[in-house]
Amino acid sequence: MSQGIVVVGLGPGDAGHLTVEAMQVLSDATEIYLRTRRHPTVASLPPHLALHSFDHFYEKAEAFEEVYENIARRVLELGQRPEGVVYAVPGHPLVGEASVHRVLALAEEADIPVRIVAGVSFLEPVTTALGIDPFDGLQIADATELAARHHPNLDPDHPALVVQLYDRDIAAQVKLTLMNLYHDDHPVTLVHAAGTPQQVVREMPLYELDRQEEIKHLSSLYIPPLESPGSLFTYQDIVARLRAPDGCPWDQKQTHLSLRKHLLEEAYEVLEALDAQDSQGLCEELGDLLLQVFLHAQVATEAGEFKLIDSVSSVITKLIRRHPHVFGTVHVNDADEVLRNWEEIKKEEKGEKFVSSLAGVSELLPALALSQEMQDRAARIGFDWDDIQGVKDKVQEELLELEQAQGAEEREAELGDVLFSLVNLARWLDLDAESALRGANHRFERRFVEVEKNVSEQGRRLNDMTVDEMEEIWQEVKAQFSRDDAENHEP
Protein backbone atom coordinates (compact mmCIF):
# COMPACT_ATOMS: atom_id res chain seq x y z
CA MET A 1 0.00 0.00 0.00
CA SER A 2 1.27 3.48 -0.91
CA GLN A 3 2.57 5.72 1.85
CA GLY A 4 0.79 8.56 0.07
CA ILE A 5 1.88 12.17 0.03
CA VAL A 6 3.71 14.04 2.77
CA VAL A 7 3.87 17.80 2.29
CA VAL A 8 6.58 19.52 4.35
CA GLY A 9 6.84 23.23 5.07
CA LEU A 10 10.43 24.45 4.86
CA GLY A 11 9.81 27.71 6.70
CA PRO A 12 10.53 31.24 5.50
CA GLY A 13 14.21 30.78 4.63
CA ASP A 14 16.37 30.18 7.68
CA ALA A 15 17.09 26.57 8.64
CA GLY A 16 16.54 27.54 12.27
CA HIS A 17 12.84 27.95 11.49
CA LEU A 18 12.37 24.29 10.52
CA THR A 19 10.04 22.54 12.97
CA VAL A 20 11.05 19.42 14.87
CA GLU A 21 8.42 17.44 12.97
CA ALA A 22 9.75 18.69 9.61
CA MET A 23 13.34 17.79 10.58
CA GLN A 24 12.20 14.29 11.56
CA VAL A 25 10.46 13.73 8.21
CA LEU A 26 13.45 15.04 6.27
CA SER A 27 15.88 12.89 8.30
CA ASP A 28 13.83 9.72 7.68
CA ALA A 29 13.37 10.34 3.94
CA THR A 30 15.82 9.32 1.23
CA GLU A 31 14.59 11.77 -1.40
CA ILE A 32 12.31 14.79 -1.57
CA TYR A 33 10.69 16.81 -4.33
CA LEU A 34 10.99 20.57 -4.05
CA ARG A 35 8.55 23.00 -5.58
CA THR A 36 11.63 25.16 -6.18
CA ARG A 37 15.32 25.08 -5.32
CA ARG A 38 15.20 28.88 -5.07
CA HIS A 39 14.76 28.88 -1.32
CA PRO A 40 17.52 29.50 1.27
CA THR A 41 16.57 26.53 3.47
CA VAL A 42 17.40 24.09 0.67
CA ALA A 43 21.14 24.63 1.23
CA SER A 44 20.77 23.41 4.85
CA LEU A 45 18.81 20.21 4.18
CA PRO A 46 20.28 16.89 5.38
CA PRO A 47 23.12 15.93 2.99
CA HIS A 48 21.90 12.34 2.49
CA LEU A 49 18.74 13.52 0.71
CA ALA A 50 18.34 13.14 -3.05
CA LEU A 51 16.84 16.45 -4.18
CA HIS A 52 14.49 16.82 -7.13
CA SER A 53 12.74 20.04 -8.09
CA PHE A 54 9.90 21.22 -10.28
CA ASP A 55 11.68 24.36 -11.45
CA HIS A 56 11.54 23.11 -15.06
CA PHE A 57 7.75 23.54 -15.03
CA TYR A 58 8.22 27.29 -14.52
CA GLU A 59 10.38 27.50 -17.65
CA LYS A 60 7.86 25.79 -19.93
CA ALA A 61 4.48 27.09 -18.75
CA GLU A 62 2.95 30.44 -19.75
CA ALA A 63 0.95 30.99 -16.54
CA PHE A 64 1.35 30.09 -12.88
CA GLU A 65 -1.95 28.21 -12.90
CA GLU A 66 -0.46 25.83 -15.46
CA VAL A 67 2.71 25.43 -13.37
CA TYR A 68 0.79 24.52 -10.22
CA GLU A 69 -1.49 22.14 -12.09
CA ASN A 70 1.51 20.32 -13.61
CA ILE A 71 3.27 20.12 -10.25
CA ALA A 72 0.17 18.82 -8.46
CA ARG A 73 -0.45 16.09 -11.04
CA ARG A 74 3.18 14.98 -10.90
CA VAL A 75 3.08 14.89 -7.06
CA LEU A 76 -0.08 12.77 -7.32
CA GLU A 77 1.69 10.27 -9.60
CA LEU A 78 4.65 10.06 -7.23
CA GLY A 79 2.34 9.63 -4.27
CA GLN A 80 0.90 6.47 -5.83
CA ARG A 81 4.26 4.71 -5.62
CA PRO A 82 4.66 2.18 -2.78
CA GLU A 83 7.13 4.52 -1.07
CA GLY A 84 4.95 7.56 -1.62
CA VAL A 85 6.50 11.02 -1.94
CA VAL A 86 7.75 13.84 0.25
CA TYR A 87 6.89 17.19 -1.33
CA ALA A 88 8.64 20.21 0.23
CA VAL A 89 7.50 23.80 -0.19
CA PRO A 90 8.63 27.17 1.20
CA GLY A 91 6.93 28.48 4.34
CA HIS A 92 3.76 26.75 5.53
CA PRO A 93 2.18 24.27 3.08
CA LEU A 94 -1.26 25.91 3.32
CA VAL A 95 -0.18 29.57 3.29
CA GLY A 96 0.21 31.01 -0.20
CA GLU A 97 0.91 27.59 -1.74
CA ALA A 98 -1.51 27.09 -4.64
CA SER A 99 0.16 23.84 -5.71
CA VAL A 100 -0.54 22.25 -2.31
CA HIS A 101 -4.22 23.14 -2.42
CA ARG A 102 -4.40 21.58 -5.87
CA VAL A 103 -2.62 18.45 -4.56
CA LEU A 104 -5.20 18.16 -1.77
CA ALA A 105 -8.08 18.39 -4.24
CA LEU A 106 -6.63 15.79 -6.63
CA ALA A 107 -5.65 13.46 -3.80
CA GLU A 108 -9.16 13.53 -2.37
CA GLU A 109 -10.57 12.54 -5.77
CA ALA A 110 -8.04 9.71 -6.08
CA ASP A 111 -8.42 8.62 -2.42
CA ILE A 112 -4.71 9.09 -1.72
CA PRO A 113 -3.74 10.02 1.86
CA VAL A 114 -2.02 13.39 2.42
CA ARG A 115 -0.13 14.44 5.54
CA ILE A 116 0.60 18.12 6.11
CA VAL A 117 3.73 18.89 8.10
CA ALA A 118 3.36 22.48 9.24
CA GLY A 119 6.10 25.03 8.83
CA VAL A 120 6.64 28.62 9.88
CA SER A 121 5.03 30.78 7.18
CA PHE A 122 6.47 33.99 5.77
CA LEU A 123 3.95 35.96 7.87
CA GLU A 124 5.76 35.47 11.20
CA PRO A 125 9.18 36.87 10.16
CA VAL A 126 7.61 39.60 7.99
CA THR A 127 5.38 40.90 10.79
CA THR A 128 8.34 40.60 13.19
CA ALA A 129 10.52 42.66 10.83
CA LEU A 130 7.78 45.29 10.57
CA GLY A 131 6.93 45.22 14.26
CA ILE A 132 3.20 44.87 13.60
CA ASP A 133 0.39 42.65 14.86
CA PRO A 134 -1.50 40.99 11.98
CA PHE A 135 -4.61 40.95 14.16
CA ASP A 136 -4.84 44.74 13.75
CA GLY A 137 -6.82 44.30 10.56
CA LEU A 138 -3.92 43.25 8.30
CA GLN A 139 -5.10 42.45 4.76
CA ILE A 140 -3.10 40.00 2.64
CA ALA A 141 -3.06 40.25 -1.15
CA ASP A 142 -1.26 38.15 -3.74
CA ALA A 143 0.90 40.29 -6.04
CA THR A 144 -0.04 38.41 -9.20
CA GLU A 145 -3.75 38.79 -8.53
CA LEU A 146 -3.33 42.45 -7.60
CA ALA A 147 -1.32 43.14 -10.75
CA ALA A 148 -4.15 41.75 -12.88
CA ARG A 149 -6.63 44.27 -11.45
CA HIS A 150 -7.19 47.91 -12.39
CA HIS A 151 -8.20 48.89 -8.85
CA PRO A 152 -6.99 47.13 -5.68
CA ASN A 153 -9.51 45.18 -3.59
CA LEU A 154 -8.18 46.71 -0.38
CA ASP A 155 -9.56 48.87 2.43
CA PRO A 156 -7.08 51.80 2.64
CA ASP A 157 -8.03 52.48 6.26
CA HIS A 158 -6.39 49.19 7.28
CA PRO A 159 -2.84 47.93 6.71
CA ALA A 160 -2.14 45.54 3.84
CA LEU A 161 0.62 43.10 2.96
CA VAL A 162 1.28 42.26 -0.70
CA VAL A 163 3.03 38.89 -0.92
CA GLN A 164 4.89 37.00 -3.66
CA LEU A 165 6.28 40.20 -5.14
CA TYR A 166 8.81 38.11 -7.01
CA ASP A 167 10.39 40.59 -9.49
CA ARG A 168 10.44 44.23 -10.59
CA ASP A 169 8.07 43.64 -13.51
CA ILE A 170 5.31 42.41 -11.23
CA ALA A 171 6.19 45.23 -8.80
CA ALA A 172 5.61 47.78 -11.58
CA GLN A 173 2.18 46.32 -12.33
CA VAL A 174 1.27 46.21 -8.64
CA LYS A 175 2.36 49.84 -8.26
CA LEU A 176 0.04 51.00 -11.05
CA THR A 177 -2.88 49.13 -9.51
CA LEU A 178 -2.21 50.55 -6.05
CA MET A 179 -1.88 54.08 -7.42
CA ASN A 180 -5.52 53.93 -8.50
CA LEU A 181 -6.40 53.98 -4.79
CA TYR A 182 -3.42 55.42 -2.91
CA HIS A 183 -1.58 58.67 -3.61
CA ASP A 184 1.66 58.32 -5.55
CA ASP A 185 3.75 59.34 -2.52
CA HIS A 186 1.97 57.10 0.00
CA PRO A 187 4.70 55.50 2.18
CA VAL A 188 5.21 51.75 1.71
CA THR A 189 7.77 49.31 3.09
CA LEU A 190 9.60 46.64 1.13
CA VAL A 191 10.53 43.53 3.13
CA HIS A 192 12.94 41.08 1.52
CA ALA A 193 14.20 37.74 2.87
CA ALA A 194 12.53 38.30 6.25
CA GLY A 195 13.96 36.23 9.08
CA THR A 196 17.24 35.51 7.27
CA PRO A 197 20.67 37.17 7.45
CA GLN A 198 19.87 38.79 4.09
CA GLN A 199 16.79 40.56 5.45
CA VAL A 200 16.08 44.03 4.03
CA VAL A 201 13.42 46.42 5.34
CA ARG A 202 13.16 49.69 3.43
CA GLU A 203 10.50 52.44 3.43
CA MET A 204 9.86 54.49 0.30
CA PRO A 205 7.09 56.39 -1.50
CA LEU A 206 4.86 54.13 -3.57
CA TYR A 207 6.04 55.55 -6.90
CA GLU A 208 9.58 54.27 -6.23
CA LEU A 209 8.53 50.66 -5.60
CA ASP A 210 9.68 49.09 -8.88
CA ARG A 211 13.06 50.85 -8.71
CA GLN A 212 14.27 48.63 -5.84
CA GLU A 213 17.05 46.20 -6.83
CA GLU A 214 16.30 43.79 -3.93
CA ILE A 215 12.90 42.71 -5.22
CA LYS A 216 13.07 38.94 -5.76
CA HIS A 217 11.12 35.80 -4.91
CA LEU A 218 11.29 36.42 -1.13
CA SER A 219 9.92 39.99 -1.28
CA SER A 220 6.74 41.40 0.25
CA LEU A 221 5.28 44.90 0.40
CA TYR A 222 3.70 46.47 3.47
CA ILE A 223 1.14 49.26 2.92
CA PRO A 224 0.20 51.24 6.05
CA PRO A 225 -3.31 52.71 6.34
CA LEU A 226 -4.10 56.23 5.21
CA GLU A 227 -3.28 59.00 7.67
CA SER A 228 -6.88 60.26 7.49
CA PRO A 229 -9.85 57.91 6.92
CA GLY A 230 -10.68 57.64 3.23
CA SER A 231 -12.34 54.25 2.84
CA LEU A 232 -15.84 53.72 1.49
CA PHE A 233 -16.26 51.14 4.25
CA THR A 234 -15.50 53.80 6.86
CA TYR A 235 -17.86 56.23 5.12
CA GLN A 236 -20.71 53.71 5.22
CA ASP A 237 -19.99 52.98 8.89
CA ILE A 238 -20.15 56.71 9.74
CA VAL A 239 -23.51 57.04 7.98
CA ALA A 240 -24.83 54.00 9.87
CA ARG A 241 -23.55 55.56 13.11
CA LEU A 242 -25.38 58.82 12.34
CA ARG A 243 -28.59 56.85 11.79
CA ALA A 244 -28.13 54.72 14.93
CA PRO A 245 -30.34 55.26 18.04
CA ASP A 246 -27.57 57.28 19.70
CA GLY A 247 -26.72 59.14 16.49
CA CYS A 248 -27.81 62.45 14.99
CA PRO A 249 -31.50 63.47 15.38
CA TRP A 250 -31.56 65.06 11.91
CA ASP A 251 -30.12 61.99 10.16
CA GLN A 252 -32.37 59.66 12.16
CA LYS A 253 -35.58 61.23 10.89
CA GLN A 254 -34.66 61.22 7.19
CA THR A 255 -36.60 59.06 4.73
CA HIS A 256 -36.23 58.32 1.01
CA LEU A 257 -38.74 61.08 0.27
CA SER A 258 -37.24 63.70 2.60
CA LEU A 259 -33.80 63.15 1.07
CA ARG A 260 -34.99 63.73 -2.51
CA LYS A 261 -34.30 67.46 -2.56
CA HIS A 262 -30.84 67.00 -1.05
CA LEU A 263 -29.93 64.43 -3.68
CA LEU A 264 -30.98 66.85 -6.40
CA GLU A 265 -29.11 69.77 -4.81
CA GLU A 266 -25.89 67.76 -4.49
CA ALA A 267 -26.16 66.54 -8.09
CA TYR A 268 -26.47 70.12 -9.32
CA GLU A 269 -23.52 71.22 -7.20
CA VAL A 270 -21.45 68.50 -8.88
CA LEU A 271 -22.57 69.88 -12.26
CA GLU A 272 -21.63 73.39 -11.15
CA ALA A 273 -18.11 72.23 -10.25
CA LEU A 274 -17.83 70.47 -13.62
CA ASP A 275 -18.97 73.57 -15.50
CA ALA A 276 -16.42 75.67 -13.60
CA GLN A 277 -13.70 73.06 -14.30
CA ASP A 278 -12.99 73.20 -10.56
CA SER A 279 -11.27 69.91 -9.75
CA GLN A 280 -10.98 70.67 -6.03
CA GLY A 281 -14.63 71.63 -5.90
CA LEU A 282 -15.55 68.49 -7.83
CA CYS A 283 -13.56 66.41 -5.33
CA GLU A 284 -15.62 67.84 -2.45
CA GLU A 285 -18.98 67.74 -4.23
CA LEU A 286 -18.59 64.11 -5.29
CA GLY A 287 -18.07 63.23 -1.63
CA ASP A 288 -21.27 65.12 -0.74
CA LEU A 289 -23.18 63.36 -3.52
CA LEU A 290 -21.89 60.01 -2.29
CA LEU A 291 -23.28 60.84 1.15
CA GLN A 292 -26.77 60.87 -0.35
CA VAL A 293 -26.15 57.44 -1.87
CA PHE A 294 -25.03 56.04 1.47
CA LEU A 295 -27.96 57.64 3.30
CA HIS A 296 -30.52 56.12 0.94
CA ALA A 297 -28.77 52.75 1.19
CA GLN A 298 -28.78 52.91 5.00
CA VAL A 299 -32.46 53.84 5.12
CA ALA A 300 -33.19 50.88 2.85
CA THR A 301 -31.04 48.55 4.98
CA GLU A 302 -32.87 49.53 8.16
CA ALA A 303 -36.24 49.04 6.46
CA GLY A 304 -35.25 45.60 5.19
CA GLU A 305 -35.68 46.72 1.56
CA PHE A 306 -32.15 46.07 0.27
CA LYS A 307 -28.52 46.64 1.21
CA LEU A 308 -25.86 48.69 -0.53
CA ILE A 309 -24.14 45.47 -1.63
CA ASP A 310 -27.32 44.56 -3.52
CA SER A 311 -27.23 47.83 -5.45
CA VAL A 312 -23.54 47.44 -6.21
CA SER A 313 -23.89 43.77 -7.15
CA SER A 314 -26.76 44.60 -9.49
CA VAL A 315 -24.86 47.31 -11.36
CA ILE A 316 -21.68 45.18 -11.56
CA THR A 317 -23.68 42.39 -13.18
CA LYS A 318 -25.35 44.87 -15.53
CA LEU A 319 -22.09 46.53 -16.56
CA ILE A 320 -20.45 43.20 -17.36
CA ARG A 321 -23.51 41.97 -19.28
CA ARG A 322 -23.80 45.19 -21.29
CA HIS A 323 -20.10 45.33 -22.19
CA PRO A 324 -19.54 42.03 -23.99
CA HIS A 325 -16.87 43.77 -26.08
CA VAL A 326 -14.83 44.22 -22.87
CA PHE A 327 -15.75 41.19 -20.76
CA GLY A 328 -16.68 38.83 -23.62
CA THR A 329 -15.77 38.10 -27.21
CA VAL A 330 -17.92 40.66 -29.07
CA HIS A 331 -16.04 43.04 -31.38
CA VAL A 332 -17.08 46.67 -31.88
CA ASN A 333 -15.69 49.29 -34.24
CA ASP A 334 -16.62 52.49 -32.41
CA ALA A 335 -18.62 54.10 -29.59
CA ASP A 336 -21.77 54.31 -31.74
CA GLU A 337 -21.77 50.53 -32.13
CA VAL A 338 -21.35 50.16 -28.37
CA LEU A 339 -24.51 52.22 -27.83
CA ARG A 340 -26.47 50.22 -30.40
CA ASN A 341 -25.43 46.98 -28.73
CA TRP A 342 -26.35 48.48 -25.35
CA GLU A 343 -29.90 49.17 -26.50
CA GLU A 344 -30.30 45.68 -27.95
CA ILE A 345 -29.05 44.08 -24.73
CA LYS A 346 -31.50 46.18 -22.70
CA LYS A 347 -34.36 44.93 -24.85
CA GLU A 348 -33.24 41.31 -24.38
CA GLU A 349 -33.11 41.86 -20.60
CA LYS A 350 -36.74 42.95 -20.51
CA GLY A 351 -37.78 39.84 -22.44
CA GLU A 352 -40.62 41.63 -24.23
CA LYS A 353 -41.50 41.49 -27.94
CA PHE A 354 -41.54 45.28 -28.17
CA VAL A 355 -39.62 47.69 -26.00
CA SER A 356 -39.35 51.33 -27.06
CA SER A 357 -35.88 52.76 -27.33
CA LEU A 358 -37.16 55.60 -25.14
CA ALA A 359 -38.16 53.26 -22.31
CA GLY A 360 -36.43 54.15 -19.06
CA VAL A 361 -35.72 57.78 -19.88
CA SER A 362 -36.56 59.71 -16.71
CA GLU A 363 -39.25 62.35 -17.15
CA LEU A 364 -37.70 64.17 -14.17
CA LEU A 365 -34.67 65.21 -16.21
CA PRO A 366 -34.41 68.93 -17.03
CA ALA A 367 -36.27 69.60 -20.28
CA LEU A 368 -33.16 70.19 -22.41
CA ALA A 369 -31.40 67.11 -21.05
CA LEU A 370 -34.55 65.00 -21.55
CA SER A 371 -34.88 66.24 -25.13
CA GLN A 372 -31.27 65.40 -25.96
CA GLU A 373 -31.44 61.97 -24.35
CA MET A 374 -34.56 61.04 -26.34
CA GLN A 375 -33.00 62.28 -29.57
CA ASP A 376 -29.77 60.39 -28.82
CA ARG A 377 -31.70 57.16 -28.36
CA ALA A 378 -33.78 57.68 -31.49
CA ALA A 379 -30.61 58.34 -33.51
CA ARG A 380 -29.03 55.08 -32.32
CA ILE A 381 -31.63 53.11 -34.24
CA GLY A 382 -31.42 55.28 -37.36
CA PHE A 383 -34.11 57.92 -36.73
CA ASP A 384 -31.92 60.86 -37.71
CA TRP A 385 -31.01 63.32 -40.45
CA ASP A 386 -28.48 62.38 -43.12
CA ASP A 387 -26.37 65.48 -42.46
CA ILE A 388 -26.31 68.63 -40.34
CA GLN A 389 -27.81 70.77 -43.10
CA GLY A 390 -31.12 68.98 -42.64
CA VAL A 391 -30.97 69.89 -38.95
CA LYS A 392 -30.27 73.56 -39.70
CA ASP A 393 -33.11 73.66 -42.22
CA LYS A 394 -35.43 72.22 -39.56
CA VAL A 395 -34.45 74.99 -37.14
CA GLN A 396 -35.32 77.63 -39.75
CA GLU A 397 -38.60 75.86 -40.52
CA GLU A 398 -39.59 75.84 -36.84
CA LEU A 399 -38.65 79.50 -36.42
CA LEU A 400 -40.89 80.41 -39.37
CA GLU A 401 -43.77 78.41 -37.90
CA LEU A 402 -43.28 80.21 -34.58
CA GLU A 403 -43.43 83.55 -36.36
CA GLN A 404 -46.71 82.55 -38.04
CA ALA A 405 -48.30 81.05 -34.92
CA GLN A 406 -51.55 82.53 -33.59
CA GLY A 407 -52.58 82.54 -29.96
CA ALA A 408 -50.60 81.78 -26.80
CA GLU A 409 -51.17 77.99 -26.93
CA GLU A 410 -49.98 77.64 -30.52
CA ARG A 411 -46.99 79.93 -29.93
CA GLU A 412 -45.98 77.86 -26.90
CA ALA A 413 -46.13 74.67 -28.94
CA GLU A 414 -44.10 76.17 -31.78
CA LEU A 415 -41.53 77.59 -29.35
CA GLY A 416 -41.17 74.09 -27.91
CA ASP A 417 -40.51 72.78 -31.43
CA VAL A 418 -37.87 75.48 -31.94
CA LEU A 419 -36.11 74.51 -28.71
CA PHE A 420 -36.35 70.82 -29.61
CA SER A 421 -34.77 71.46 -33.01
CA LEU A 422 -31.99 73.51 -31.38
CA VAL A 423 -31.25 70.62 -29.02
CA ASN A 424 -30.94 68.39 -32.09
CA LEU A 425 -28.48 70.90 -33.58
CA ALA A 426 -26.46 70.75 -30.35
CA ARG A 427 -26.38 66.97 -30.63
CA TRP A 428 -25.09 67.15 -34.20
CA LEU A 429 -22.40 69.57 -33.06
CA ASP A 430 -21.45 67.03 -30.36
CA LEU A 431 -22.44 69.48 -27.63
CA ASP A 432 -24.56 69.06 -24.53
CA ALA A 433 -27.51 71.46 -24.76
CA GLU A 434 -28.06 71.56 -20.99
CA SER A 435 -24.40 72.45 -20.33
CA ALA A 436 -24.41 74.98 -23.17
CA LEU A 437 -27.40 76.82 -21.70
CA ARG A 438 -25.94 76.70 -18.18
CA GLY A 439 -22.76 78.20 -19.61
CA ALA A 440 -24.76 80.94 -21.35
CA ASN A 441 -26.62 81.66 -18.10
CA HIS A 442 -23.33 81.92 -16.23
CA ARG A 443 -21.82 84.27 -18.85
CA PHE A 444 -24.93 86.46 -18.81
CA GLU A 445 -24.84 86.66 -15.03
CA ARG A 446 -21.18 87.74 -14.98
CA ARG A 447 -21.65 90.31 -17.71
CA PHE A 448 -24.93 91.70 -16.43
CA VAL A 449 -23.58 92.19 -12.91
CA GLU A 450 -20.63 94.06 -14.41
CA VAL A 451 -22.97 96.21 -16.51
CA GLU A 452 -25.00 97.05 -13.41
CA LYS A 453 -21.80 97.90 -11.56
CA ASN A 454 -20.53 100.19 -14.36
CA VAL A 455 -23.86 102.00 -14.64
CA SER A 456 -24.04 102.43 -10.88
CA GLU A 457 -20.52 103.88 -10.76
CA GLN A 458 -21.66 106.45 -13.32
CA GLY A 459 -24.46 107.47 -10.98
CA ARG A 460 -27.09 106.29 -13.44
CA ARG A 461 -29.83 103.60 -13.63
CA LEU A 462 -30.49 101.10 -16.39
CA ASN A 463 -34.15 102.19 -16.48
CA ASP A 464 -33.05 105.67 -17.58
CA MET A 465 -30.76 104.50 -20.40
CA THR A 466 -31.56 104.01 -24.06
CA VAL A 467 -31.24 100.63 -25.75
CA ASP A 468 -28.23 101.86 -27.74
CA GLU A 469 -26.48 103.02 -24.56
CA MET A 470 -27.10 99.69 -22.84
CA GLU A 471 -25.87 97.80 -25.91
CA GLU A 472 -22.66 99.85 -25.99
CA ILE A 473 -21.88 99.08 -22.34
CA TRP A 474 -22.80 95.43 -22.86
CA GLN A 475 -20.38 95.09 -25.77
CA GLU A 476 -17.59 96.78 -23.78
CA VAL A 477 -18.11 94.39 -20.84
CA LYS A 478 -18.32 91.39 -23.17
CA ALA A 479 -15.05 92.36 -24.86
CA GLN A 480 -13.31 92.83 -21.50
CA PHE A 481 -14.39 89.42 -20.26
CA SER A 482 -13.21 87.86 -23.53
CA ARG A 483 -9.76 89.44 -23.07
CA ASP A 484 -9.61 88.31 -19.44
CA ASP A 485 -10.63 84.75 -20.33
CA ALA A 486 -8.03 84.63 -23.12
CA GLU A 487 -5.26 85.73 -20.72
CA ASN A 488 -6.33 83.18 -18.10
CA HIS A 489 -6.13 80.35 -20.65
CA GLU A 490 -2.68 81.25 -21.95
CA PRO A 491 -0.19 78.39 -21.43
Image: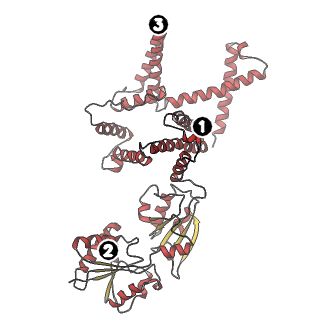
Q: Give the camera-side residue of 170 and 73.
A: 73
Q: Residue at x 70, y 23 (%)?
A: 451
Q: Is residue 267 visible?
A: yes
Q: Residue at x 35, y 70 (%)?
A: 98
Q: Is 444 placed left or right of 398 in the picture?
A: right
Q: Is 105 placed left or right of 38 in the picture?
A: left
Disc 1 to disc 2, C-alpha distance: 57 Å
In the rendered view of the protein, which quadrant contains the C terminus?
Answer: top right
Q: Is residue 336 above or below residue 419?
A: below
Q: Give the camera-side residue of 208 and 301.
A: 301
**Residue underneath mark 3:** 406
The amino acid type of the residue labelled 3 equals: Gln
**Residue underneath mark 2:** 57
**Residue underneath mark 1:** 276
The amino acid type of the residue labelled 1 equals: Ala
Q: Name the residue at the top extreme.
A: 406
Q: Residue at x 51, y 79 (%)?
A: 195
N-terminal label among 1 and 2: 2
Q: Give the camera-side residue of 112 and 183.
A: 112
> Crowding at label 3, few (<14), some or many (≥20) Cα neighbours within 10 Å?
few
Q: Is residue 428 visible?
A: no
The amino acid type of the residue labelled 2 equals: Phe
Q: Quadrant of residue 347?
A: top left
Q: Is residue 8 above or below residue 285?
A: below
Residues at circles 1 and 2 in contact by the CB criterion of under 8 Å: no
Q: Quadrant of residue 117?
A: bottom left
